[in-house]
Amino acid sequence: MARILVQEAGFDVAAETQALQADRTDVGGIASFLGVCRSDDGLAALVLEHYPGMTERALAGIAAQAEARWPLTGCTIIHRIGRMLPGDPIVLVLTASAHRTAALESCAFLIDWLKTGAPFWKREEFADGRERWVEAKPEDEAAAQRW
């Protein structure tokens, strides 16, 4: 069963990784993805909004697909909401399996699907006062469809 968190607070990557393998001897590999807020084109902040309940269910559904496709021994998805500054961590995906291929492939699958299938609304705030909502990118859609 995947551990899914949607929260404003930051997270500790090392502690989350340790928790995923604690007291287990069947974990041969843990794959991770850490998404961080960039500062492209003068971006001052990224604001993430969500609909509580709906978002967690969508993330759990995506995680369930990964668990059905790969022999995972653990899965953690933490996605932050609220106002992020450049350099702030936004999302953490951890997958554990007895073998590296399953861990790596499932981690890539999850982040590709989170980019397109997770109901978050993202607004960019720029240093010059401009704001804009982030639209889905064709390359993100294509990455999800490869699975």
Image (spheres, rainbow, N blue to C red):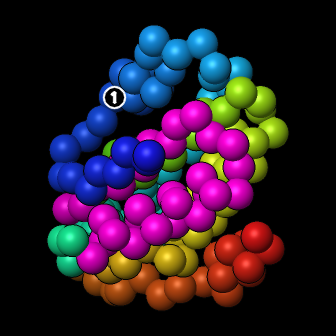
**Count of labels shown?**
1
Viewer-proximal residue, 106 or 69? 69
Q: Is residue 11 visible?
A: yes
Residue under pointer 1: 12
Q: Residue at x 37, y 78 (%)?
A: 119
Q: Is residue 92 visible?
A: no
Q: Position of residue 70 (x, y in %)?
A: 71, 49
Q: Look at the numbered disc 1 and give the secondary structure of its residue.
A: loop
- What type is the residue that disc 1 sits on? Asp
Q: Is residue 20 magenta?
A: no
Q: Residue at x 69, y 43 (%)?
A: 71
Q: Position of residue 97 (x, y in %)?
A: 66, 33
Q: Residue at x 58, y 34 (%)?
A: 73
Residue 16 shown left or right of residue 35 in the figure: left
The vertical placement of 130 against 10, above or below, is below
The vertical placement of 83 against 113, above or below, is above
Q: Position of residue 91 (x, y in %)?
A: 42, 51
Q: Residues within 10 Å of mark 1 (few under 14, many from 20)?
A: few
Quadrant of the image for the C terminus?
bottom right
Q: Residue at x 59, y 64 (%)?
A: 65
The vertical placement of 59 against 34, above or below, is below
Q: Find the magenta span and give its range.
A: 54-82
Q: Position of residue 102 (x, y in %)?
A: 75, 42
Q: Quadrant of residue 68?
A: bottom right
Q: Quadrant of residue 139?
A: bottom right
